[in-house]
Image: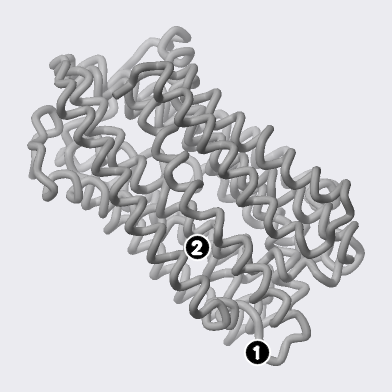
Amino acid sequence: MLSPSAPSRSWKTFLHYVIPSVAAMVLFSSYTIVDGIFISKGVGELALAGVNISLPFINFLSGVAILLSMGTSTLCAFALGQGDHEKAEKIFTQTVAIIVGISIVITIAVSLLSEPLAYFLGAGPQTVGYSAQYLHVVCLFSLCFILSYCLEVMVKVDGAPQLAMFGVGVSFLINVGLDYLFIMVWHWGVFGAALATGLAQLGSLIFFLIYFLSGKSNLRFRRFSFHPKELRRILPLGIADCSIELMLGFLTLLYNHVITSLLGESSLPIYAVIAYISLLVSMVMQGIAQGMMPLVSLAVGEKDQSAIRLYLRRAFLTVLVVGAVVELVCQAAPGVIVSLLLSGDSSLFDETVTALRLYALSYLPAGITIVLAGYFAALGKAGASALLSLGRGFVLLPAAILGIYLLGAGSVIWTAALIGELLSLALGLVLLRRKKAL
């Protein structure tokens, strides 16, 4: 196992962090994607749309987890790089305690307001039943979603990034098995999909807790006194990655309302398919960024400027390769991808194929921007990271969507993502130059 305080500069070391991070993010998002596949095949297209309408809540849970976890991992990496092991453990333990408190509040609130929340997220008469049921069940596992993600991030800082992949992989298998049992065998529909997802997250949480409580970890839970100052440092550093999740949720909400207005509620399954695919691509890109981040942060702690630049270049190259492959597949065989979530004889199949081809053009610029935001956060430049991420997710992309909506452009709505991502990439490159971060 590599020491977290002294990584080498080889590609092997870089991939040692990036591959488990990407795998963990893919498996983490695959809970939702697998739900979508089983729901589409076992329940129907409207149920698929109803669950997709609920996804902003999942994004919100993930966003809370990332907001606390990314900043915590950065500060812990700084402390470890400086040899202050006790400080790292106190920061880690404080974050876990905060997560427990926040999760309890979320669970109570959403369990009482699941149907109004479903309408707010874009559900209509045909989909509100599916959406509200999914929200009500999933919210009961809020602690599992948030804390399991935090622990998955912290095992990387602890020097065991491979455990992130194994732990999330175990819960992924649980989710697949339970989805098949609950939906295809017992016919529990959307309720079964939500329950399978929640129990899988519980499995992930148990796996990581065993690691941190077994005495095998370098980081351990320790007594601490609450320090608001540390929390104030953590939150800005987590905004970049958090906003990616919140952005996905916000854009899903926005697209659902816009599509219903332009094309009708019956067209919501088109965006449901694109949203599931985009979630997977976004998680891959985010995994690359998160794999890079602890290496950059450790290099910052050691004041190794050449290593910092090296890790950024390798992250860029990795995103370019992955983005090119994804783009090729989406343009050459979109029907194969769409068929995972829609039946070939669906009246929406051809429209979904066309929409995917247009939307997929945005994936490569999005990946580069995600890496830039993560890089700024890893350097401790919270302002630049937050400006890029928040500007992308809550200004530029929504502006592109609303602009096309105001033009009443109908199917052209699928090009909004490309316009917004190119504007975001331009902002990221300007910040990179102004901050002299190379």
- Judging by the rendered image, the residue that carries numbered circle 1 is 344
Count all numbered tags in the image, as a single digit: 2
* Mark 2 nearby-residue class (10 Å; few <14, some 14–19, many ≥20): many
Answer left or right for 68 relative to 375: right
Left/right of residue 367 with respect to residue 123 in the rendered view: left
Q: How is the image coloured?
A: one colour
Q: Residue at x 51, y 27 (%)?
A: 239
Q: What numbered label is drawn on residue 429?
A: none
- Please tell me which residue is depicted at 31% across the width and 55% down the height of the picture: 167
Q: In the rendered view, would you say 148 is above or below 68?
A: below
320 vs 154, nearest the viewer: 320
Figure quadrant of residue 170: bottom left
Quadrant containing the N terminus is top left
Q: Quadrant of the C terminus?
A: top left
Under circle 1, the secondary element is loop
Residue nearest the viewer, comparing 405 with 172: 405
Residue 223 visible to an observer of this rendering: yes
For numbered disc 2, what is the local secondary structure? helix
Residue 261 place in picture, x, y as percent: 90, 57
Residue that sits furthest to the bottom in the current view: 345
Q: Nearer the viewer, mark 1 or mark 2?
A: 1
> Which residue occupies 32% across, 44% down?
316
Q: Is residue 288 left or right of residue 193?
A: left
Sequence-earlier tag: 1 or 2: 2
- When the figure is inspected, residue 303 is found, relative to residue 38, above or below; the finding is above
Residue at image location 73% in from the left, 70% down from the top: 269
Q: What residue would you read off at disc 2?
A: 31
What is the spatial separation of the Cα atoms under label 1 and label 2, in whole angstroms?
23 Å
Q: State the image quarter where residue 159 is shown.
A: top left
With respect to residue 356, does 368 lie above or below? Answer: above
Question: Residue 320, image x and y in percent?
Answer: 35, 53
Which kind of residue does numbered mark 2 sit on? Tyr
